Image: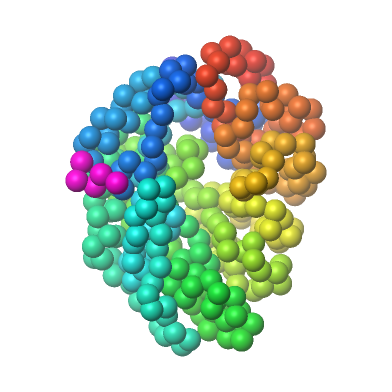
Amino acid sequence: MQYVSDWENLKARCTRWWNKELDTPLIQLFVNSARDNTWDPWRLVHNLDDVEGTLRAHTEYRSKLAYELDAFPHFGVEFGPGIVASALGASVTVRPDTVWLRRTPPIEIGEALSWDWDNDWYRRVRDVTKHVARHAEGRFMVGIPSHSGSLDLLSMLRHSDRLLLDMKLEPECVSAWMRNLTRFWLESFRRFYNLVAPYQVGFSTPMPIWCPGSWYPVQADMAAMISPDDFGTFVLPDIETIAGELDYTIYHLDGPGQIPHVDLLLSVPELDGIQWIPGAGEEGAASPKWYPLLRHIQEGGKLVVLLDIEAEEVRPLFQNISPRNVLLTVRSNQPGDRDLLASYL
C-alpha cells in the first residue's frame, strides 16, 4: 500500500478493532503540510469525460499528504448520496457541491418497485468504479459509491413530505416498499463488492475504514424526522437485515434528531458500531457536549467512529470516554501531532 510503512500491521490492527479485540483506539492522522493541497470530492462527477485526469490529480494530492499512525490512502468514488437510486428511476441532477436524486413524478401508493441494472447512470457509476479499482490495485483503497439507506432511497422515489404522511396513513405500503428496497440495496451492494474485490485486499466504502470483509455505514438520514416507534417499524428491520448479511456494519448517526433512536440501534446485536456526526450548526463530534452520548454508545457495546476531529480534542475526549473501540480521523497541518497522538497507541 502506497505511503504506508507497515500495511500488514495496519490491517491486523483494523481487524482486531472490528472484532473489539484492540486495546487502543485506531487513529487515522492525515498531515497536509502544503496548505494549498486540497481535494474536491466532486471532481469526478464534474469531469466524467476525464476520469484519468481526476486520477492524476488525486495521485498528486496523495503525494503531498503524510499518512500517519492508522491512516492509509483512499479514493471514494463520489457520485452523490444514494446514486444507486438511479437504477430505481430517480433522475440525477449534478450541482457544484452535491448531486440530487429524485423521481418525478413520485411513485404512487401501491406501485410496485422495479429496477434496471442497465440504467445509464448506474452503468456509468459501475464502469467508473471498476476502472478506478483496476487503476488503484495495490496502491490505495477504493471506497464504493454511496448506497445511502433504504429509507433515504424511498424518500427519493416517493418524496419525503408524502412519505411522512404515508407512514401514518399507508404503513403497510411503506413496509412493503422498505422490504423490496432492502433486497435492492443488498443486491446492488453485492454487485459493487464483487466489482472491486479482484483488485484490493479487504474492503472500504465512502467512509475510509479498512475492513477484512464486507462492511457499510448503514444510514437513514430521514429518520431525524420520525419517531422512535416509526423508526422501529420501518427502519430497524432494514438495518437488522443488512447487518445480518454483511460481515460488519456501522450506523451513520446524523444529527441530534436521531439521538432518540440510539437505544433501538444498541439493541441490534449484529450492528457493530455507530458513527456520530452532529451536523450543520452543531458543535463538533468530539465536543464535550456529546460525551454522555458517546459513553452511552460504548456502554451499549458498540464501536464509536468520529471523523475529522482536531488533534487538540483527542486528550480531553479520552479523559472522558474509553479510548478502546474508538476510531478517529484527524486532519492536521502540524507534523508534530504525530507524536502527540501516537501516545494513545
Relative to 109, 113 lies left or right: left
Residue at position x 26%, y 66% in the image: 119
Q: Residue at x 39, y 40 (%)?
A: 41
In this rendered view, identify the residue nearer to me: 126 or 10: 126
Image position of 229 with respect to 140: above or below:
below
Looking at the rendering, the stretch of residues picked out in magenta corresponds to: 46-50
Residue at the limit of the structure toward the left, as seen here? 49
Query: Is residue 136 within the magenta segment?
Result: no
Q: Is residue 135 left or right of residue 74?
A: left
Q: Which quadrant would residue 295 be assigned to in this image? A: top right
Q: Which residue: 58% across, 63% down?
A: 222
Q: Residue at x 50, y 38 (%)?
A: 209
Quadrant location of the C terminus in the rendered image:
top right
Residue 287, above or below 221: above
Image location of residue 37, percent across then percent down: 40, 24
* Residue 121 visible, this orientation: yes
* Res. 273 in view: no
Note whether 13 is above or below 173 in the view shown: above
Report which quarter residue 56 is drawn in: top left
Residue 313 position in % (x across, y down): 69, 27
Residue 227 drawn at (x, y percent): 70, 69
* Snapshot colouring: rainbow
